[in-house]
Image: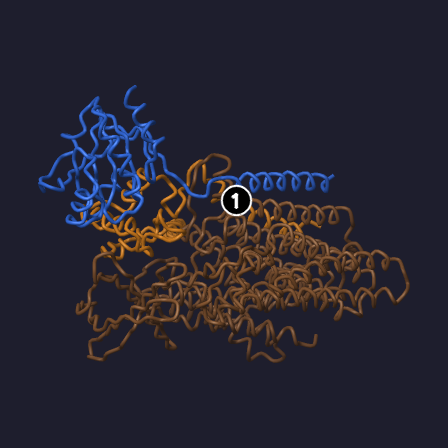
């Protein structure tokens, strides 16, 4: 029973669920780092000083103050600009292969190595 | 036998990769997010001249066509498209609203007095947040709206062809 | 003008020499005469000379600001400082390809010099395969990307070089990186040649091992220099962004690291022949694919070269010819795997190395799929997704934990060992200490995740074990140093990740703002005109709670040709942390966006990678 609990805890912590409240500016920066600056070449909103990025940072700050959650803020920008603006690809039908391919490869490789020893 | 299967798999993967790379060479490198048929989020904006707040609900009446053009005095391409906007002003079926983006009031007013006012109404977006509510990310951008729905979006300065398109769209 | 033409002719001569070398190689394959070998050697040398001459001519053209040369016109300017005129010659598409070519011909020449003890057929075939690659590159250069095109009339002034590229670190970054990439071409050619000659065995392994190690050292250092440049020059305080071009340099590195370990198994135990071959082919394939992806304009990145689909087609076809060639050879020729010495056991060093490879391949696949998935998705469905740091962190960190632990104990295993290793109780003590330190770190940084504790714990176990190794009798010092350096590297980036602090605000001259117990004051502002830019130098004081003042002078530069704005951060480094202040000009008159960061252990990050390379260098010179 305890083992299951720790295992689930371990899985949860891998996926970064926070157990406490994050200070506002830290959260602002975190969100800004996860959004792509659409008028720049490969910079995040956090790093960019373009007008667009500055306005986005302002919106992030306001939405946090209004009580929006991190997820809601990402949803807002996604609805305005598409998935392209988020740096973390979601896990959906289109991207499942992306997330799962390396894991499958690892399992397959592990199986091959395993076979070398135990099946003679 | 196993060797043959592996060989076939490898060939299939390589053909796929070749196909992808080949096709990708001819794709556009910039991404244009299209939000056709999107509804406008309600907004409040200040009138450039009167400083009164106006609500989007008052402005965007059902069944009426509105064109929102995002511009600024410091934006060179906006100057380029200005004469086409003047042409659009002559069409009485269109309500042309200018959204002044991240600009100083005096500079905006000067731009208008020097070049002419194509707009029926000029609103200000000093912080740039309204433009994001519309889904814009740069200027100039132009939205053709019917009621509260976005029919078409233009990124970059308007050309003569665009004006013709807009008028055609309105006349339908 | 003269040098441009001379450079062009030298290039053409290099092409002709290629054909001559092919001729002699084919003649020499079943021929007993010694003369053929000397001929091949002479022409390899001549080819090296002509391409060197070509490259020197390009540099001279840049130094003389010969704008009749199209490449010089596009990338240089009379006001550029001399050092950057020189480095500008390889800081553009055409010039960098000429550099690739130079290293290719240089390495094949070195190969012919240093492989005399090996079978003639093998050497000749390696040279043949290498010349196929050289032939492809020269053709590519001459047809689509000639650095010696002449434009008429001669322009008076050039278009300039992007000022962000005018940096010493970036000047040496391509040469070092290419030494790594191109080294992998020899490994590729040599592997294919060895396969056809049934020469994949211990003696081949010892010899190719030197090439693998040197390639690896250069690639490691090349990536390091690139990161250092990004950190100091791009002004964002980060050193790795999982940007497409960075990923492209990292992928061959994973492959090469795996190969580095696998070749040991081949050398000691004559095993894993097929896998060695696959890795050799994959490493070079990744290098060339990388070249394709970066120069074809497919990728969206901070570091892109000019976009040109026609160049892309050429490299794509060339790449696939090489791949098809290697696959045909791989499937057609049998690898001689005699079953008698084959036995491997669970707790042997061979297993540990295979597991290392498994992890390397996993890391490789994560970076690979992250880099090309957006391309695939866009071609197939017109949808775009962005794949950034969150993706890579999520997939890599959990596996890093396992990797660190296995690395800590894997090196202890012996070759051909079938017995369970003895349990040494001191290891439990190490485990206990590691967890204790980790919990302490997690507590003081408020990360409070079980995950961080485990990650730090695994890291500390590796550090302790590799330190312990230095005191073992007859230890393999170069290996210990490399593994120890890697453990310190991971520690540095983890600590840097959790301990970094940042502050940002918009300030104008005279402002003072409080940051926790310190304050930052904008005390100075002046404008100076320099040779090819206008410099706005700002002065800031960071005053800590004891009243101690530290001065920073970040700069904003407005270049004239081309018109670009850059920010030069002021970075104060000491052993334990870097203090990083950067400003950006804002539209509102007189206001600057000020960003102050404290980044701990940056010097440790750079130093540990240098140590890692030194470990490699020591291994290179080891007499085994």
Q: Is residue B2 above or below residue C179?
A: above
Left or right? Give the position of C448 relative to C279: left
- Image quarter where the C terminus of chain C lies is bottom right
Q: Residue C118's image quarter?
A: bottom right
Q: How far across and down, in percent of the image, does residue B47 sit?
A: 13, 40
Q: How far across and down, in percent of the image, does residue C533 sit?
A: 36, 66
Crowding near pointer 1: few (<14 within 10 Å), some, many (20+)?
some
The answer to whether any part of residue B117 appears in the image is: yes
Residue B112 or residue A12, whichever sits in front: B112
Residue C616 or residue A57, whichever sits in front: A57
Secondary structure at badge 1 equals: helix
Residue B87 or residue C251, whichever sits in front: B87
Q: Which residue is mark 1?
A: A101
Tell me the shade of chain B.
blue
Q: How far across and down, in percent of the image, does residue A50 sit?
A: 30, 53
From the rendered image, report the letter of the chain displayed in orange.
A
Q: Is residue C312 above or below residue C3?
A: above
Q: Residue most toward the front?
A: C153
Residue C470 or residue C10, whichever sits in front: C10
Q: Residue C221's image quarter?
A: bottom right
Q: How is the image coloured?
A: by chain
- Image quarter where the N terminus of chain C lies is bottom right
From the rendered image, report the letter of the chain displayed in brown.
C
Q: How far across and down, in percent of the image, does residue C104 sit?
A: 66, 62
Q: Residue C126's image quarter?
A: bottom right
């Amino acid at each position: 029973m305890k083992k299951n609990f720790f295992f689930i805890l371990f899985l949860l912590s891998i996926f970064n669920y926070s157990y406490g409240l994050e200070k506002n500016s830290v959260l602002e920066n975190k969100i800004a780092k996860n959004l792509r600056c659409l008028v720049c070449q490969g910079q995040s909103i956090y790093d960019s000083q373009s007008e667009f990025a500055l306005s986005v940072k302002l919106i992030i700050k306001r939405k946090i103050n209004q009580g929006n959650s991190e997820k809601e803020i990402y949803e807002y920008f996604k609805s305005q600009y598409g998935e392209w603006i988020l740096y973390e690809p979601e896990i959906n039908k289109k991207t499942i292969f992306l997330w799962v391919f390396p894991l499958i490869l690892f399992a397959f490789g592990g199986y091959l190595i395993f076979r070398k020893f135990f099946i003679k | 036998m196993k060797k043959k299967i592996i060989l076939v798999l490898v060939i299939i993967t390589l053909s796929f990769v070749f196909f992808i790379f080949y096709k990708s060479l001819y794709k556009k490198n910039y991404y244009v997010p299209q939000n056709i048929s999107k509804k406008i989020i309600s907004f409040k904006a200040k009138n450039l001249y009167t400083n009164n707040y106006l609500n989007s609900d008052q402005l965007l009446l059902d069944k009426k066509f509105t064109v929102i053009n995002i511009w600024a005095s410091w934006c060179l391409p906006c100057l380029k498209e200005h004469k086409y906007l003047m042409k659009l002003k002559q069409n009485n079926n269109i309500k042309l609203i200018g959204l002044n983006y991240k600009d100083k009031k005096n500079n905006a007013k000067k731009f208008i007095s020097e070049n002419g006012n194509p707009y029926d109404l000029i609103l200000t977006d000093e912080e740039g947040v309204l433009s994001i509510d519309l889904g814009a990310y740069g200027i100039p951008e132009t939205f053709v709206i019917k009621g509260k729905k976005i029919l078409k979006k233009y990124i970059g300065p308007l050309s003569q062809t665009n004006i013709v398109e807009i008028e055609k769209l309105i006349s339908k | 003008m003269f040098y441009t033409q001379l450079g062009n002719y030298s290039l053409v001569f290099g092409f002709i020499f290629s054909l001559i070398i092919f001729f002699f190689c084919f003649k020499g394959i079943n021929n007993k005469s010694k003369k053929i070998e000397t001929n091949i050697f002479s022409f390899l040398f001549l080819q090296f000379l002509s391409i060197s001459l070509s490259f020197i001519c390009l540099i001279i053209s840049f130094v003389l600001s010969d704008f009749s040369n199209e490449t010089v016109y596009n990338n240089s300017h009379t006001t550029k400082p001399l050092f950057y005129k020189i480095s500008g010659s390889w800081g553009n598409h055409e010039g960098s390809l000429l550099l690739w070519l130079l290293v290719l011909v240089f390495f094949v020449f070195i190969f012919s010099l240093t492989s005399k003890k090996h079978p003639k057929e093998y050497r000749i075939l390696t040279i043949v395969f290498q010349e196929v690659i050289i032939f492809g590159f020269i053709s590519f250069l001459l047809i689509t990307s000639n650095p010696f095109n002449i434009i008429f009339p001669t322009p008076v002034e050039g278009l300039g070089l992007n000022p962000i590229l005018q940096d010493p670190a970036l000047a040496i970054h391509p040469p070092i990186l290419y030494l790594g990439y191109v080294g992998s071409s020899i490994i590729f050619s040599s592997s294919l040649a060895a396969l056809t000659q049934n020469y994949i065995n211990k003696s081949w392994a010892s010899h190719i091992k030197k090439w693998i190690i040197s390639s690896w050292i250069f690639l490691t250092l090349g990536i390091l220099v690139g990161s250092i440049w990004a950190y100091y020059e791009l002004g964002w305080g980060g050193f790795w962004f999982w940007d497409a071009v960075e990923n492209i340099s990292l992928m061959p590195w994973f492959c090469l690291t795996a190969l580095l370990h696998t070749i040991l198994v081949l050398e000691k135990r004559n095993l894993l022949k097929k896998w060695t071959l696959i890795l050799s082919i994959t490493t070079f394939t990744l290098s060339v694919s990388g070249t394709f992806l970066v120069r074809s304009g497919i990728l969206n990145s901070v570091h892109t070269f000019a976009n040109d689909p026609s160049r892309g087609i050429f490299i794509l076809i060339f790449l696939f010819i090489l791949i098809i060639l290697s696959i045909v050879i791989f499937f057609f020729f049998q690898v001689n795997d005699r079953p008698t010495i084959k036995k491997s056991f669970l707790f042997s060093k061979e297993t540990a190395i295979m597991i290392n490879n498994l992890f390397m391949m996993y890391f490789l696949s994560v970076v690979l799929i992250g880099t090309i998935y957006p391309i695939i998705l866009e071609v197939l469905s017109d949808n775009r997704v962005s794949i950034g740091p969150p993706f890579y962190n999520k997939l890599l960190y959990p596996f890093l934990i396992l990797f660190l632990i296995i690395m800590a104990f894997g090196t202890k295993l012996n070759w051909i060992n079938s017995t369970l290793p003895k349990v040494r109780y001191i290891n439990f003590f190490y485990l206990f200490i590691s967890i204790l330190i980790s919990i302490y770190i997690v507590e003081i940084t408020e990360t409070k995740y079980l995950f961080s504790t485990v990650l730090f714990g695994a890291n500390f176990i590796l550090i302790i074990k590799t330190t312990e190794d230095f005191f073992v009798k007859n230890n393999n010092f170069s290996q210990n140093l490399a593994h120890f350096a890697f453990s310190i590297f991971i520690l540095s980036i983890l600590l840097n990740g959790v301990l970094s602090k940042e502050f940002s605000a918009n300030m104008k001259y005279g402002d003072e703002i409080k940051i926790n117990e310190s304050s930052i004051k904008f005390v100075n502002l002046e404008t100076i005109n320099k040779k090819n830019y206008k410099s706005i130098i700002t002065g800031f004081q960071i005053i800590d709670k004891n009243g101690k003042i530290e001065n920073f002078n970040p700069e904003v530069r407005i270049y004239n040709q081309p018109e670009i704005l850059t920010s030069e951060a002021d970075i104060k480094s000491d052993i334990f942390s870097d203090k990083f202040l950067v400003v950006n000009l804002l539209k509102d008159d007189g206001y600057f966006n000020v960003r102050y960061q404290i980044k701990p252990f940056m010097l440790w990050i750079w130093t540990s990678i240098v140590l890692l390379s030194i470990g490699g260098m020591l291994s290179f010179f080891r007499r085994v």
